[in-house]
Structures are given as structure tokens and as C-alpha cells.
Image: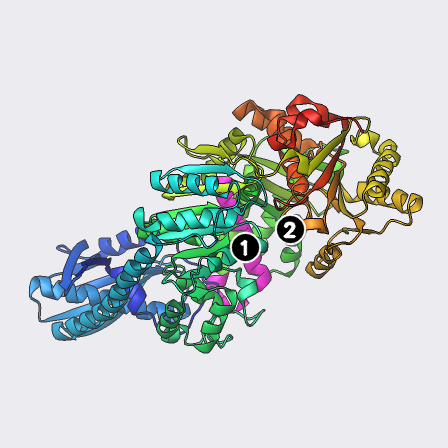
């Protein structure tokens, strides 16, 4: 029989929560304030008072360990200390139940260890601002404590034994996992072998593999096969967009995981999972939060028995048991074998999966799809903005208690605006050579003032006030870690509407440790060249491996042409319109069918589209528009029917430049009238300087490589299967440059590039 070891906090967290889910805003003490509070309480106790008292005990095959906050032997009094802000009445009932359970378990361990017959249990609640203690006391016998302890342990053991049995069945099944098709696609076996070796050696793999070879299944199958052999606790398949989750779930279905003892969980954003939008996550307002913890045990059991928990299945289980689908999903992330979700669940500063991995010492296999997007996604995770207009609006409507700190912040902002020289740049954009420390200090004071106000006036916790507090806290946290990995800027489009930003440019400094926290990581995409770009900017481990899977496509399948007599540089764009129109028309007339034409901006797209419609009204055209909604995007893609004809105009790097699948003759060609280079502006020039100083790759890391990633992704829409054939027309003379050609796929046979 397996022996288990569990901490008191973990035991009680699983068995003893009860009552409502309550996620209303409650300003909580920081970890440092919590430690200082515990020390303050201990300093007030008399001689002989024992702190951080180690306790342990055994129940059947369960070892329970922990440290009690304080014990006064003479008074026979055991204390559990909790710090809080504001009125104790705001504390959720489920938290109080958890605290009582903890001190009771500690009491049972103490009585057993010291042979005590009775004990006084005390919950000490310390309000950190005032230093005031509130004591809740309970006299209890050792027999009662032992009975409570036994009940908690029995409930935990029932679940732990079930989980051990599930783990054994899961590993046995995965040991015999069979590829779901008669054979691998060309290139797919090579990818699968590389992934399996990566999982076996505990390394990081950067895998560049062509679109259309089945990368999703080609990574999931070997990682799951390695799961029992490498004692992996979890596999996380992380995506950039919703379609990536769908592909992963489809691949898992093909592996027959619904009939295998493998728990699959899809994590979705809270706003998409919420059944009562606009309702606070608390029992008083949301029926699925009321009594959440009372029904959680049954819902959790039903969910793990279901096993397959995509968005709809999880929702069905949750509503059957009348609990919140989102928070049931958060709970089940602890018990799922495969989690499919967004990359933020591992790489964000408060990432759920990373936090659980650290807390439980899991061995995790990470699979990161469309990994070429991770640089920009990670940059966004560790960037923040402050909006002067929002602060001014808050200042006008704020209660009097916040007037002074908000006024001080307003003065600092005005001083900053005056210090910045006049600029002719768009939005009067300015890069600052340092953080405005006085403004940040004033912002910190505002966050403290809002926090204290909400402690005293919880009913005033409006959405606007909370959002402003969270924005301020996020900015201050990044300001504390500000360094060469980030830039600070100020945009002043109009008076009173300045935006102050901290922009992360080297995410490696933040997310590098996340790769080390996983047992093995596989980042895969059709565009991961050059390897050093991703290694440097993401902070990949030194022992990482880069692999390029040979393309199953032959050069004859894709005709690649370059128009070296066209320049799409900004100052040449007007002159380029007629030549581009001619190229589009000639190709379409030579081989009618469906094409996509990509441009660097909507303005450029609209200029070419207007000229094309005037010159060739007989050719069907349709175009991406600014701010397209999901329904409009679906309608755009629906035009690409088998055997159809027309040219779709789109923006490079937009919704139709990657992540869409138009196989066969639904798409037979693409025109790319740009190198995809980021705009030449003050920010990108400062980024270039930072990239040059850190990596010696200023121009390449800022402009050329990001641009060519977009080009190759867009071109990858054309050939989607071994049977496809098509054409890609690259329109810019710079495509003939050796340093640009080096970033194009090798199977394109670049030596055949010719002038149009």
C-alpha cells in the first residue's frame, strides 16, 4: 500500500472548505506583512511561548506534517495566527472554516504528541494597520480533536487512493499507446522521435516543422508515450489562440483518450466561462457561487469520473452540480493529466499551472504551439500602462479620502508632461531615459490610499476603483523590477490624455526560469528561424536543442517568384500600386482561383484594392477591414470554397496571415507585398539599440527577423497537404537580398527566385 505525506494546510484545503465561493475584492496583506504580523503576535506573548512548533502524526498510511504558529504550554493554549486588513466581518466563511480546521488538526497532533487530554484552540486575527488582535477561542477535548483529525484523513485518503489507482491505470494505458493512423505523415515521425527524446532527456526542444505535417498529434503522441516512462505528472498543451486548443482536443480524441483513463481538461478565460456575466463572484449575487464549496466534492468526483472535460463537458458537469464552471476548472487543473489552455497559464506572472507545479513539485511536459508568437505574447505579459485620462476621471469622482493622493499624482503627471520636449512624432511619443520615480512613488501612495479606503468602505468597491487599483499595483510591481529588459515611454496624443508605459522588450529575464521549472519543453512552429533569436529573447536553457524537420513538400509544389522591380518601402508605395495590380491580375488570369494578397497596412491595402477594382472589375475581390468581429472573419473565410475564385485582400500579421487552414483548391496562391518589417519609429529604434547592446543583433532582432516570420507564416497558408500545389509571389526587391533569403524556408529552392 502506498504511503502519503501531506502538509496540514494542503490537507485542510482539500477537505475542510465549506460555504460560498467568494472572490469579491478584499485587500490582503502581503507575504512580508504576514511574516511581520506573526512576529508581532509572538513578541506580545509571555516567556515559554513556542513559535513555529513542528508537529507530525500518522493516520493509517498517511503522514501529516506542519508547523503550528504558537503554543503556550502553561496556558495549554494553541494559536493559529492570521493577518488581515479592515473589518474581520469581511472575511469569507469558507476562509474561517479553513482556519478552524487547520488549528484543530494541529491540536490533534499536539495532543497525541504530548499526551494532552484537553486543549484551548485560538484563532488570532491580527489587523495589520492597527495591530489589533481579535481572538476566537474554543475549548476542546483530545478525543474530539482526534475524531476530527481521523475524519479529515479518511476523506483525504479516499481521494489519494483513488488518485494512485488512476495514476497506475493511466500509466499502464499510456505504456501501450498506439498511433491512431496506419502510418505517420512525412516528417511527422521525425518530429515525434525528437519530442520523445526531449521528454526522455529532460531538455528543451525548439522544433521548426512545416505546416501540414500534423505537428499537434506529432507532439502529443510522443509526450504522452513518455509520460509513464519519465514519471510525468502532467502534460500541458499551450496555445496562442482558441483554434489551437480545438486542434489539440481533436488530436487527443484521435488517440482515443475518451476511452482511456486519461483526464483531459480545457481551460478557458473567466469571461468566456461565466454563466452570469456582470455578476460578482460571491454567494450573495451568483447562484453558482452560493454553497460552491459544499457542492465541490461531488462535482469534482463527477468530473474526474467523466475524464474528458472540454469546455462543454466541464460546463455540463458544473451546471449539473450547480457550481461555477470556471472555478471548477481551476480546481480540476490539480487533477487533470493533460491540460489544454492558453500560454498565459504557464508564463504569466500569476500563472495557474506554473504555480501548481511549484507548489506540488510536479514533473511537467510542456508543449507550446505556434511558438513563434511567444516573444510578443510574453512581452505583453510583462508590460503595463497608465492612462492619465482614466486617472483624471477617477479624481473627479473619487471620495474625499482619495483626493489628496490623487491630486499629488496629478501634479507629478503634469510635471512629467512639461519635462518632455515637444515632439512631431505620432501621438507625441517620447521614450524616457529613466523611470519617473516621483510619479511612481505618487502612484504607490494612490494604491495604498485606495486599498485602505476599500478596507474601511467595502461597499464602495466599484469596478472603476478596483480596475484603477489593479492597474496601479501592476505598474508599481513592474517598476520595482525595471531594468534593461524594459523601456519606459510617454505618449501625449492630446492634453490630459497621456499614456505612460513600461514595455518589456526582453521577456527572457522574466520567463527564462519558467522553462527550468518544467521537466521538458517543446516549442514548435513552422517558423522558428533563426534559433538564436528565440533562445536569446525567451531565455531558453543552454542545453536546449534546435531541430528542423525536413519538409514533406517538394519545390515543384510551390512556385515561388519575386518581383525585384517593385519596392514596397514607405516612400515608394504610391509608385508601387500599379505594378502590384498588374502582378495580381496577370497571375489571376493565368490561373483563376482563390488567392490571398497581403499588405503592410490597411491604408496600403485599400489603395491597391481601389486601383484593382477600377482596372479589373471582372475579378471578384473581398477585403479584411479594421476591427473585424469574429462573425465577419468567419464570413471572410467562408468565401474560400472548393472551386471558387477571387482575391482576398488582408493585412500581414493579421487574422488571416496565420492559424487558418484552406487546403486543396480553396487557396491556390498568395501575394505578399511587404517584408512585414515593424514600422520605423522612436520605440523600434530604441528597441534596436537595446537589442544591439544586449545581443549584437539590433537590426535583425528588431526588424528583419520579426518581419520575415510574418511573411513565411502568410506563405504557409498555400501548401497545407502533400497533394496541394500553389504559388507565392513576393513583391519587393529586398527579397533578393542574401540576409533576407536566409530566413525563407529551405525547401522553397530559393535559387529559382526570379524577377517578375
Region rendered in magenta: 454-480
Q: Which mark is residue 661?
A: 2
* Element assignment for label 1: helix
Q: Residue at x 30, y 62 (%)?
A: 166
Q: Residue at x 57, y 60 (%)?
A: 465
503 or 723, nearer to the observer:
723
Sequence-first tag of 1 and 2: 1
Verify CB contact (< 8 Å) between mark 1 and mark 2: no
Looking at the image, how many numbered discs can be counted on the residues?
2
Q: Residue at x 73, y 45 (%)?
A: 668
What separation in Å lies between label 1 and label 2 (alpha carbons)? Answer: 11 Å
Residue 127, image x, y percentages: 36, 60
On screen, 53 above or below 316?
A: above
Judging by the rendered image, the residue that carries numbered circle 1 is 247
Question: 686 and 611: which one is in front?
Answer: 611
Q: How is the image coloured?
A: rainbow
**Near-viewer residue (645 or 130):** 645
- Which residue is at the far front? 182
Residue 644 lies in quadrant: bottom right
Amino acid at each position: 500500500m502506498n504511503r502519503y505525506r501531506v502538509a496540514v494546510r494542503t490537507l485542510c484545503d482539500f477537505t475542510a472548505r465549506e460555504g460560498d465561493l467568494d472572490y469579491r475584492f478584499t485587500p490582503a496583506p502581503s507575504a512580508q506583512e504576514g511574516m511581520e504580523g506573526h512576529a508581532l503576535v509572538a513578541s506580545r506573548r509571555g516567556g515559554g511561548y513556542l513559535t513555529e512548533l513542528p508537529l507530525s502524526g500518522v493516520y493509517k498510511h498517511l503522514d501529516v506534517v506542519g508547523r503550528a504558529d504558537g503554543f503556550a504550554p502553561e496556558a495549554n493554549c494553541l494559536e493559529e495566527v492570521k493577518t488581515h486588513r479592515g473589518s474581520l466581518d469581511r472575511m469569507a466563511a469558507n476562509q474561517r472554516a479553513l482556519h478552524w480546521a487547520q488549528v484543530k488538526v494541529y491540536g490533534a497532533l499536539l495532543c497525541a504528541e504530548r499526551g494532552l487530554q484537553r486543549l484551548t484552540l485560538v484563532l488570532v486575527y491580527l489587523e495589520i494597520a492597527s495591530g489589533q488582535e481579535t481572538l476566537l477561542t474554543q475549548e476542546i477535548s483530545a478525543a474530539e480533536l482526534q475524531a476530527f483529525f481521523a475524519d479529515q484523513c479518511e476523506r483525504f485518503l479516499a481521494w489519494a487512493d483513488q488518485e494512485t489507482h488512476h495514476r497506475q491505470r493511466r500509466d499502464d494505458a499510456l505504456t501501450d499507446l498506439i498511433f491512431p493512423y496506419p502510418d505517420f505523415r512525412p516528417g511527422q515521425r521525425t518530429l515525434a522521435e525528437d519530442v520523445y527524446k526531449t521528454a526522455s532527456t529532460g531538455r528543451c526542444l525548439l522544433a521548426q516543422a512545416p505546416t501540414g505535417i500534423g505537428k499537434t498529434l506529432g507532439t502529443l503522441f510522443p509526450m504522452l508515450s513518455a509520460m509513464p516512462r519519465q514519471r510525468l505528472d502532467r502534460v500541458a498543451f499551450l496555445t496562442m489562440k482558441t483554434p489551437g486548443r480545438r486542434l489539440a482536443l481533436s488530436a487527443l480524441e484521435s488517440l482515443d483518450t475518451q476511452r482511456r483513463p486519461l483526464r483531459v481538461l480545457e481551460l478557458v478565460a473567466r469571461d468566456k466561462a461565466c454563466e452570469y456575466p456582470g455578476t460578482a463572484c460571491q454567494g450573495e449575487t451568483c447562484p453558482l457561487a452560493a454553497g460552491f464549496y459544499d457542492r465541490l466534492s461531488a462535482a469534482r468526483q463527477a468530473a474526474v469520473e467523466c475524464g474528458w472535460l472540454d469546455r462543454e463537458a466541464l460546463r455540463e458537469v458544473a451546471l449539473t452540480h450547480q457550481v461555477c464552471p470556471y472555478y471548477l476548472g481551476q480546481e480540476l487543473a490539480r487533477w487533470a493529466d493533460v491540460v489544454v489552455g492558453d500560454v498565459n497559464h504557464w508564463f504569466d506572472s500569476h500563472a495557474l499551472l506554473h504555480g501548481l507545479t511549484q507548489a506540488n513539485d510536479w514533473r511537467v511536459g510542456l508543449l507550446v504551439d505556434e511558438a513563434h508568437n511567444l516573444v510578443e505574447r510574453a512581452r505583453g505579459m510583462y508590460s503595463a500602462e497608465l492612462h492619465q485620462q482614466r486617472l483624471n476621471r477617477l479624481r473627479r469622482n473619487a471620495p474625499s479620502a482619495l483626493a489628496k493622493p490623487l491630486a499629488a499624482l496629478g501634479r507629478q503627471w503634469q510635471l512629467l508632461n512639461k519635462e518632455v520636449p515637444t515632439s512631431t512624432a505620432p501621438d507625441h511619443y517620447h521614450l524616457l531615459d529613466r523611470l519617473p520615480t516621483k510619479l511612481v512613488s505618487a502612484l504607490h501612495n494612490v494604491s495604498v490610499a485606495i486599498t485602505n479606503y476599500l478596507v474601511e468602505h467595502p461597499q464602495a468597491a466599484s469596478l472603476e476603483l478596483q480596475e484603477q487599483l489593479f492597474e496601479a499595483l501592476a505598474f508599481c510591481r513592474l517598476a520595482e523590477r525595471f531594468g534593461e529588459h524594459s523601456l519606459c515611454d510617454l505618449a501625449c496624443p492630446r492634453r490630459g490624455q497621456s499614456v505612460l508605459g513600461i514595455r518589456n522588450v526582453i521577456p527572457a529575464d522574466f520567463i527564462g526560469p519558467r522553462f527550468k521549472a518544467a521537466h521538458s519543453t517543446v516549442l514548435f512552429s513552422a517558423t522558428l528561424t533563426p534559433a538564436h533569436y528565440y533562445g536569446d529573447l525567451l531565455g531558453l536553457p543552454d542545453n536546449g536543442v534546435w531541430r528542423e524537420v525536413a519538409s514533406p513538400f517538394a519545390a515543384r509544389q510551390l512556385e515561388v517568384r519575386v518581383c525585384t522591380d517593385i519596392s514596397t518601402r514607405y516612400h515608394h508605395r504610391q509608385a508601387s500600386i500599379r505594378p502590384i495590380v498588374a502582378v495580381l491580375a496577370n497571375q489571376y488570369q493565368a490561373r483563376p482561383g482563390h488567392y490571398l494578397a497581403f499588405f503592410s497596412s490597411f491604408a496600403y491595402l485599400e489603395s491597391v484594392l481601389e486601383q484593382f477594382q477600377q482596372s479589373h472589375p471582372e475579378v471578384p475581390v473581398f477585403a479584411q477591414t479594421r476591427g473585424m468581429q469574429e462573425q465577419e472573419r468567419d464570413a471572410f473565410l467562408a468565401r474560400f470554397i472548393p472551386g471558387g475564385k477571387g482575391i482576398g485582400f488582408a493585412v500581414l500579421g493579421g487574422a488571416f496571415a496565420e492559424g487558418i487552414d484552406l487546403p486543396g483548391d480553396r487557396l491556390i496562391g498568395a501575394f505578399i507585398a511587404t517584408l512585414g518589417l515593424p514600422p520605423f519609429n522612436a520605440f523600434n529604434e530604441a528597441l534596436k539599440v537595446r537589442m544591439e547592446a544586449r545581443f549584437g543583433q539590433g537590426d535583425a532582432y528588431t526588424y528583419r527577423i520579426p518581419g520575415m516570420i510574418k511573411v513565411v507564416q502568410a506563405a504557409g497558408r498555400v501548401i497545407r497537404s502533400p497533394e496541394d500545389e500553389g504559388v507565392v509571389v513576393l513583391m519587393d526587391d529586398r527579397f533578393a537580398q542574401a540576409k533576407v533569403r536566409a530566413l525563407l524556408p529551405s525547401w522553397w529552392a530559393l535559387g529559382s527566385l526570379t524577377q517578375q
